[in-house]
């Protein structure tokens, strides 16, 4: 029973990590029809491989955000913000090692070292994932789907949450942190709720 729960938890963590990691360049329905079938299928496979490599980086955490775009010539453009320079180089090395990738453009930004930003990261994390908050459920994942990016006192929230209410709760919690200059809420919700 415990082993089965452990396996289920691991699978759920992987699914959550994949949902939290956007990789553009996925094949659209149009690409998967007609003469472009092979090209669209290849792009989708490369995007899946890239996503897997990025979400399994050892030091990738809630304070980092990685994204990638797969271009038609199999070039991968890496973007996002990270707190460690080694994470930028590790992401590039991982993606470059994929046989299906022709070229890698690394546009990942390394966030500046700042004691104030480090304190804001921790304070924002505690505010959002407080144990008595409805958002606490997200904190028990290996990499929570809500990512907290702090640069020069400005907070950006990225990732995917279950619904619009969770999106608003995360923003309100971040805005209440003392010392935060601004909050840019870029969280996406899985459910599109009707306005009626």
Image (cartoon, rainbow, N blue to C red):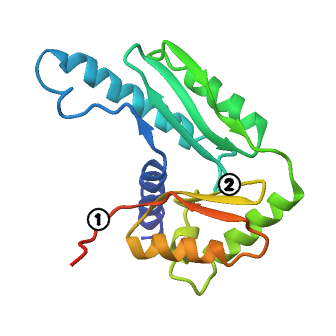
Residue holding disc 1: 192
Q: Look at the numbered disc 2 and give the secondary structure of its residue.
A: loop
Q: Horizontal and vertical percent for residue 77?
A: 53, 26
Lateral position of residue 191 relative to residue 32, left or right: right
Q: Is residue 73 above or below residue 178?
A: above
x, y percentage for residue 186? 50, 57
Position of residue 44 measured from the top left corner of the image (x, y, whole percent): 33, 29
Q: Is residue 74 above or below residue 196?
A: above
Q: Secondary structure under badge 1? A: loop
Q: Quadrant of residue 175?
A: bottom right
Q: In the picture, residue 143 is in which quadrant?
A: bottom right
What residue is rendered at 39% in x and 71% in y? 164
* Residue 16 image label: none
Residue 36, given in percent of the width and then of the height, sits at 19, 17
Quadrant for the N terminus in the image: bottom left
What's the CA distance linking mark 1 and mark 2?
Answer: 26 Å
List the residue tagged with mark 2: 63
Name the residue at 64% across, 24% down. Answer: 93
What residue lies at 42% left-to-right and 76% top-to-bottom? 165
Query: Which of these two is toward me, 94 or 35?
Result: 35
């Amino acid at each position: 029973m415990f082993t089965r729960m452990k396996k289920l938890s691991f699978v759920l963590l992987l699914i959550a990590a994949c949902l939290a990691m956007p990789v553009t360049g996925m094949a659209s329905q149009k690409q998967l029809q007609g003469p472009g079938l092979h090209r669209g299928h290849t792009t989708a496979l490369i995007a899946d491989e890239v996503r897997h490599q990025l979400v399994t980086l050892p030091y990738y955490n809630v304070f980092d955000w990685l994204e990638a775009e797969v271009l038609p010539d199999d070039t991968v453009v890496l973007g996002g913000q990270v707190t460690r320079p080694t994470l930028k180089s590790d992401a590039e090395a991982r993606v470059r090692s994929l046989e299906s990738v022709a070229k890698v453009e690394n546009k990942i930004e390394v966030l500046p070292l700042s004691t104030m930003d480090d304190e804001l990261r921790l304070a924002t994390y505690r505010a959002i994932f407080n144990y008595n908050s409805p958002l606490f459920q997200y904190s028990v994942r290996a990499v929570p789907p809500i990512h907290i990016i702090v640069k020069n006192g400005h907070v950006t929230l990225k990732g995917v949450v279950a619904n619009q209410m969770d999106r608003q709760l995360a923003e309100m919690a971040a805005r209440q942190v003392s010392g935060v200059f601004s909050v840019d809420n870029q969280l996406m919700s899985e459910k599109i709720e009707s306005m009626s």
